[in-house]
Amino acid sequence: MNKLRRFCSLVTLLIAPFALLGMRGGTKPAPGKAYRAYLGTYTTKTNSKGIYDIQFDSATGKMSAAEVAGDTKDPSWVVVHPSGKYLYSVNEMGKASTVSAFAIDSKRGKLTLLNQLPSLGEDPCYLSFDRTGKFLFVANYTSGTVAVFPILADGKLGEHSGLEQDSGTLGPNKERQDGPHAHFIAPSEQNRFVYVADLGLDRVLIYKFDSAKGTLARVGTDTAAQLKPGTGPRHIAFSNDRKFMYVVGEMASSVTVFANEKQESFRAIQTERMLSSGFSGRNDAAEIAIHPNGKFLYASNRGHDAIVLYAVDQQSGLLRQIADVPTGGKEPRHFAIDPTGTFLLAENQLSDTIMEFRINPTTGELTPTGETLTVPSPVCLVFVPGK
């Protein structure tokens, strides 16, 4: 026994310096969390085959080459079910538009079509789930209709349970605001209401949502968040505490801040221009997102081709512009922040590239990492939850 103790003591003396070196940072960091992400694209007049998937390392930012996951036409917006088992896409094809349901192969990432239904409108451009994951919301841009589809136990879409036509006073732009144009739809935190950004009406409309029946009902004709004429609201982001709503105006290249003063009553408290004073070319604002820590807001410009960064005052909800960062390509229609909040991936639709930026956790500033992914006509990116 004494010999064994002496041997163990000798081993401890020999390895102790190396253990101390490891504690001081001499060892490699633990590997990052691997995620899968799906990419929506336009297939018409491009080389795209449909929906692509990639592997993403949240520690290093490394992205694998994109592979075709599902062959489908013009899947310009995709969402992954909270269970991680199913993916749903729009098929933006004018009057022939549909919504598709796919099963996800958890090992290979490939998609198997479950079913496909008419979107009940022209050119669907946005999908989201209710808070229970039992219903899928659809915003049809050209027709200005919004629809609700139940999600069945096997992931397929059931026949629609709700369908509404947006209505109200049109905006002043005769070309872009010739009718209602639903561009965003998402539920409230309590799942009792649904918010719809309508580009043609310069409003965020509010519908009451019956989560048992999957139906929608307009909450009064005047109940809405009103934007300045000609703003063209496109997408919405909410503060983490849901006290503030941020609306990106596609046509005005602006972000409008609304305070949620009481239940479904919003008051505009700030409008920030997204373009620098020296820029005079054509621009269409596109995506908007708040960093997971709630301190920073990002929005993208197409034409100016940049991501605009704002600091968020979490008490007042007000914004302060910090910077605008070129995306290294043309038409960043969409961008996504990875689940850890470490990287921002900007999708340049007309350059067929995805450019990666590291996010400074203290300042929110974006720094290009040099990682670039080639994908035909990328216009949407979503990470698989829980991977």
Image: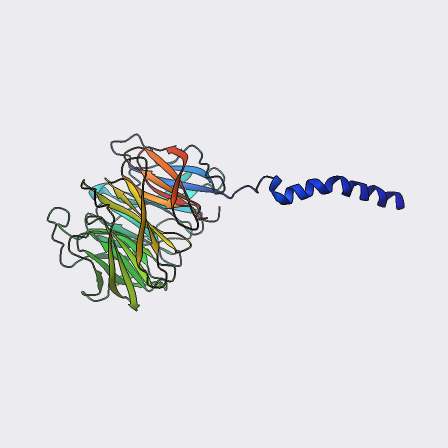
Q: Where is residue 20 in the image (x, y as percent from the top left)?
A: 68, 44
Task: State left or right for residue 218 relative to residue 376.
Answer: left
Farthest right residue? Answer: 2
Farthest bottom residue? Answer: 262
| Residue at position x 73%, y 40% in the image | 15
Q: In this view, does 316 lie above or below 142?
A: below
Can you see residue 172?
Answer: yes
Q: Where is residue 252 in the image (x, y as percent from the top left)?
A: 19, 50
**What colouring method underlies this structural image?**
rainbow
Which residue occupies the foreground of this view, 261 or 328?
Answer: 328
Q: Where is residue 68 in the image (x, y as percent from the top left)?
A: 39, 34
Which residue occupies the foreground of this view, 35 or 283?
Answer: 283
Can you see residue 102?
Answer: no
Q: In which quarter of the image is residue 27?
A: top right
Which residue occupies the foreground of this view, 250 or 320?
Answer: 320
Which residue occupies the foreground of this view, 75 or 279?
Answer: 279
Farthest top residue? Answer: 47
Task: State left or right for residue 197 relative to residue 101.
Answer: left
Q: How many marks?
A: 0
Q: Where is residue 313 in the image (x, y as percent from the top left)?
A: 35, 59
Q: In which quarter of the image is residue 44?
A: top left
Q: Quadrant of residue 377?
A: top left
